Amino acid sequence: MNVYLQELKMAVSSAIYWTIGLLLMMTLYMMMFPALSKDVSAIQEIFNNFPPEFVKALGLTTFDLSNIIGFYGYLFTYILLIGSVYAMKSGISVLSEEVRSKTSDFLVAKPISRNRIVTAKLMSVLTLIIIQNIIYTIGAFTVAHMIATTSFNQSIFLLINVSLFLVQLFFVALGLLISVLMKKIKTVLPITLGIVFGFFIIQMLNQSLDDAKLAYITPFAYFDAADIIESASFDITFFILNMIIILIFTVLTYFIYNKRDMSSV
């Protein structure tokens, strides 16, 4: 419990900043909806001058920007990107911080098992991400109701927001695994940005090339907002795949952490 509370105390300020950032970005872009929704045809004409592959990569062909659900779905692509960076950063840093500060041998020498250490740290990350998602979802609903001039499907809106949490779980699990696979991580952010943006680029290629195989590689395709809007549900295949991958990453993290040499040098 002491490890859990200490991790919460150390990470709560970062979680607050990232949550405020998500809310500010969402609010600023949603405020553009009333003006943009009136000129969708003009915007479409502009994008018609771009190569079709480029427009498809940006997801502009799959969303109806004239209604708030479609507009939010397009915006959410970038909310998902930012939320994933935070989740990945949290997953990598929570187990690697002792290695960077050369205090890992001190921690494992305490009368607490390595499994309990991983569990406490993982629970601290999940707690903050759950709180972040609750606050963000409430904020998104509030802003949407303030801006929308007509009623919208709140179930679909909720599903889109829940997908943020599910994708974040993937990146937390991946971040934890990377933190125990790499012997020493000097800085977290470059690794985080490289991996998250790598997956995001694969998703853009997936949208541009319409290659179904690419969708299985990137978690950004598992809960695509356009698919959620169209079907009003999650794709059960991708949902199960996401959960299996998270479970595998987490089990491997526990296994490797228990076998790892915790030298402070």
Image (tube, rainbow, N blue to C red):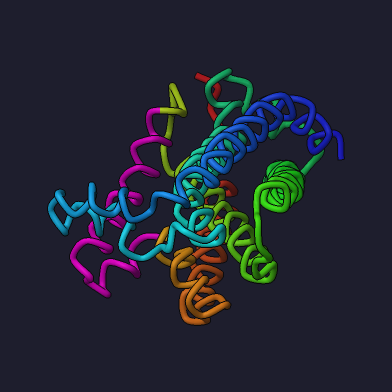
Q: Is residue 86 left or right of residue 210?
A: right
Is 263 placed above or below 236 here?
Answer: above
| Residues shaded magenta | 190-218
Q: In this view of the protein, which residue sits in the foreground, 68 or 160?
A: 68
**249 in relation to 98, above or below:** below
Reply yes or no: does residue 198 show up in magenta: yes
- Percent position (x, y) of residue 54? 19, 52
Rendered residue at 52%/81% (across/down) = 236
Residue 124 visible (yes or no): yes
Majority secondary structure of magenta residues: helix
- Side (left or right) of 192 relative to 151: left
Where residue 193 appears, x then y in whole percent? 39, 35
- Residue at the location (66% across, 48% down)? 147
Q: Nearer the viewer, residue 38 or 103?
A: 38
Q: Is residue 184 above or below residue 43?
A: above
Residue 123 seen in the current view: no
* Image point (41%, 63%), residue name: 63
Q: Quadrant of residue 93?
A: top right
Placement of the N terminus among the 4 image quadrants: top right
Quadrant location of residue 139? top right
Residue 211: where, in percent of width, then height?
22, 71
Q: Nearer the viewer, residue 144 or 202?
A: 144
Query: In the shown orientation, is residue 241 left or right of residue 254?
Result: left
